[in-house]
Amino acid sequence: MAGEVTLHTLLARPSLPTASTPQVAYILLEVMPGQLVANMRMPVNVAFVLDRSGSMKGEKIDRVRRATARAVELLGDQDVTSIVIFDHRTEVLVSTTSAANPGPIAEKISRIRDSGGTRIAPAIEQGLREIEKGPPNAIRRMLLLTDGQTEHEQECLRQADAAGRNGVPITALGVGKDWNEDLMIEIGNRSGGTADYIGRPDEIDEYFSSTVQRAQAATVQNATLTLRLVQGVLPRAVWQVIPLINNLGYRPVSDRDVSVPLGEVESGSGRALLIELLIDPRPVGQYRIGQAEVSYDVPLLGLQGERTRSDIMLGFSADPAATAQVNPAVMNIVEKISAFKLQTRALQDLAAGNVGGATQKLQSAVTRLLNQGEVDLAQTMQQEIANLEQNGQLSSEGQKTMKFGTRKTVRLSDIEHP
């Protein structure tokens, strides 16, 4: 069949100048479920693993109760769910059950009360056990929320590895300021999921609902990008830019072919990638520098190993007017990735004790963010620069805002469809 997935490529510069040295080319690649599958919905199996420690007291625990009940309401008759709550102990509040009747589940959710300390690893392990009880054909997800530090971080990472091996991406969410964002990011990465920062308790509902809806929209499975490049073209990086900025890396397949696993592709948002290629000098002319191919499965249609392809064409010109032409949308994304890289390197400098280097990189990131219209994030970063200059360290909230905020600067509205 054809049309289940569309593949668009767009160059930052349609033509490069003729030169004697290699040049970098940026290609925006968008993978999107087509109209044929856009309205399909996958059955999901989601486990909520929720911190109910003493520090969750008050508005946070109240918002968690409401957000969990609301997320369960979004599930349908074909979906299953489970709820694990934890402090220094772990308790299965709702064992794996159909979501067809949310009333009894909501009644149990209403009983969640705060108490005790925070131990995350046993709760993740129990959540995985609950997910294993569900149907084999469902999209599997774990939503983990905490507001505190935990013991036995290595055990958390071992459980995240287990989740990744078993096809259970973890959405690791931290609320407040007293949790370890690096641990949560690593839990998300190792499981094939993601992590995020909830700055205010009233935002919990949105994050929970979004996690469920995105799982339901994951109609395309096991997607893999293969880049087949001609001689004289080398890959430098493959960046995911939607849904979040992330360096995906790549795996060599042959001398000039590389593979990038994409996993699930969601209807409505898809996956957008920015590819950096190093191009050897060429005479004036139009060249096919490679081909992008995406293989994928659509379980609801019984399809496996389907493929869609798009050639990548690039011009070389001696005309300054031609080589000056750029695609503003793609260059905008290049700049946002530059801001993300500067922020990441600044934090690395700070961890190494290089406050001056960190300050300089953050200031450069501020300039880029302001140029891209990211005023709120730039202001937060500017305040953290002041914190560095005054006392040599960042605030907990500011550091979290920067780490997670710079990953979310690319939006669907930034992409111009060809």
Image (tube, rainbow, N blue to C red):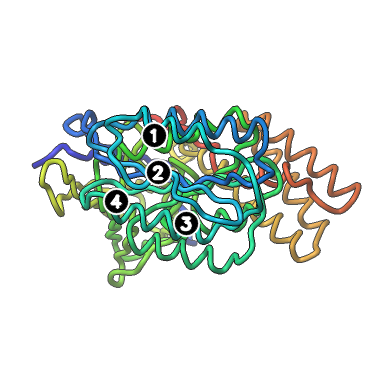
Q: CA distance from mark 2 to mark 1?
A: 7 Å
Q: Residue at x 46, y 38 (%)?
A: 330
Q: Residue at x 42, y 30 (%)?
A: 106
> Quick one: quadrant of the C terminus?
top left
Q: Secondary structure at mark 4?
A: strand
Q: Are marks 4 and 3 in contact (CB under 8 Å)?
A: no
Q: Position of residue 135 (x, y in %)?
A: 22, 49
Task: Point out the frontmost of discs 2 and 3.
Answer: 2
In-front residue for pair 242/76: 76
Q: Earlier in the sequence, mark 2 or mark 1?
A: 2
Any mark on residue 94, and which? 2
Three-letter amino acid code of the residue under disc 4: Tyr
Q: Position of residue 141 (x, y in %)?
A: 37, 47
- Reading the image, the residue beneath label 1 is 105
Q: Are marks 2 and 1 in contact (CB under 8 Å)?
A: yes
Q: Position of residue 35 (x, y in %)?
A: 20, 29
In-front residue for pair 75/214: 75
Residue 60 appearing in the image: yes
Q: Earlier in the sequence, mark 2 or mark 4?
A: 2
In-front residue for pair 252/161: 161
Q: CA distance from mark 2 to mark 3?
A: 15 Å
Which residue in the rendered view is the most extreme toward the bottom? 255
Three-letter amino acid code of the residue under disc 2: Val
Q: Is residue 379 depicted above or below 147 in this figure?
A: above
Q: CA distance from mark 4 to mark 1?
A: 59 Å
- Reading the image, the residue beneath label 3 is 124
Q: Earlier in the sequence, mark 4 or mark 3?
A: 3
- Reading the image, the residue beneath label 4 is 287
Three-letter amino acid code of the residue under disc 3: Ile
Q: Earlier in the sequence, mark 2 or mark 3?
A: 2
Q: Is residue 29 depicted above or below 417 in this figure?
A: below
